[in-house]
Amino acid sequence: MNKSFLVIIVIAVIGTAAAFTISPYFTESTVDEALPSGAIIQPKITEKVMIEKDTITEDIMMEDTITEDTMMEDTIPISYSGTFVGIGDGIHDAQGNAFTIPLEEGGDVLRLENFKSTNGPDLYVYLSTDDKATEFINLGKLKASSGNQNYEIPNDVDLGKYNKVLIWCKAFGVLFGSAEISYP
């Protein structure tokens, strides 16, 4: 009787561990966060000029047409930007763009756009000095496996030094993908 009870406990522990490890691969989540409030927005002037040349077809002549439109668009001044690259093992992957947005009250926000990652347990967003997370700043748990996401960057972070954005599995110490961000 004691052996059967011990076997049941071992199976329950192994089953729970397997479910924790494997289940994230089968669930996906999406988030679409708006730009952070307090993001510095600047007007951008775009001029659009359209020119049509004279065309003669069967005695019909089209006249020159010149249209000039001035459009005002809002744009966000991006400080640092980069593109995610997966590790290429066929299991762990991350794609999309990473960039920083300055805030009106000071500081920056890391924004992931058009982001998609394979799911996994215990995924975090790090700013790091390398792809091995030997020296890093934890920005928090990954909010979703896909979509647009914002992460607050502490004010004292030197983005020239911590120039890698990592999607990192904390439980197993595994990199899913990284984006090297640089000043444009």
Image (cartoon, helix red, strand yellow):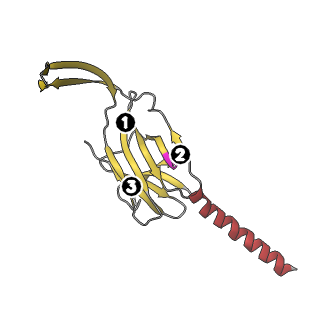
Q: Which mark is residue 74?
A: none
On the rendered structure, is 42 left or right of 155? left
Which residue type carries mark 3? Ser
Label 1 or label 2, whichever comes before in sequence order: 1
144 drawn magenta: yes
Q: Amino acid at mark 1?
A: Ile
From the image, which quarter does the C terminus lie in? top left
Q: Earlier in the sequence, mark 2 or mark 3?
A: 2
Note whether residue 162 is visible.
no
Q: Label 3, label 1: how many angstroms apart (C-alpha)?
A: 18 Å
Q: Which residue is mark 2?
A: 143
**Secondary structure at numbered mark 2:** loop
Please provide percent x and percent y for residue 11: 73, 72
**Which segment did they paint magenta?**
141-146
Is the residue 28 above or below the residue 2 in the image? Answer: above
User: Residue 26's x, y, as percent?
Assistant: 59, 57
Q: What residue is pinned by disc 1?
A: 101
Which kind of residue does numbered mark 2 sit on? Lys
User: Overall secondary structure of the magenta stretch?
Assistant: loop
Question: In the rendered structure, does residue 115 fall within the stretch colored magenta?
Answer: no
Number of callouts: 3
**Corner quadrant of residue 51:** top left
State which mark lies toward you, 1 or 2: 2
Q: Residue furthest front?
A: 58
Residue at coordinates 19% horizontally, 24% vertically from top-left? 49
Name which residue lies at 32% across and 36% down: 78
Circle 1: is it few (<14), some (14-19), or many (20+) Cα within 10 Å? Answer: many
Residue 163 lies, in percent from the top left, at 33, 50
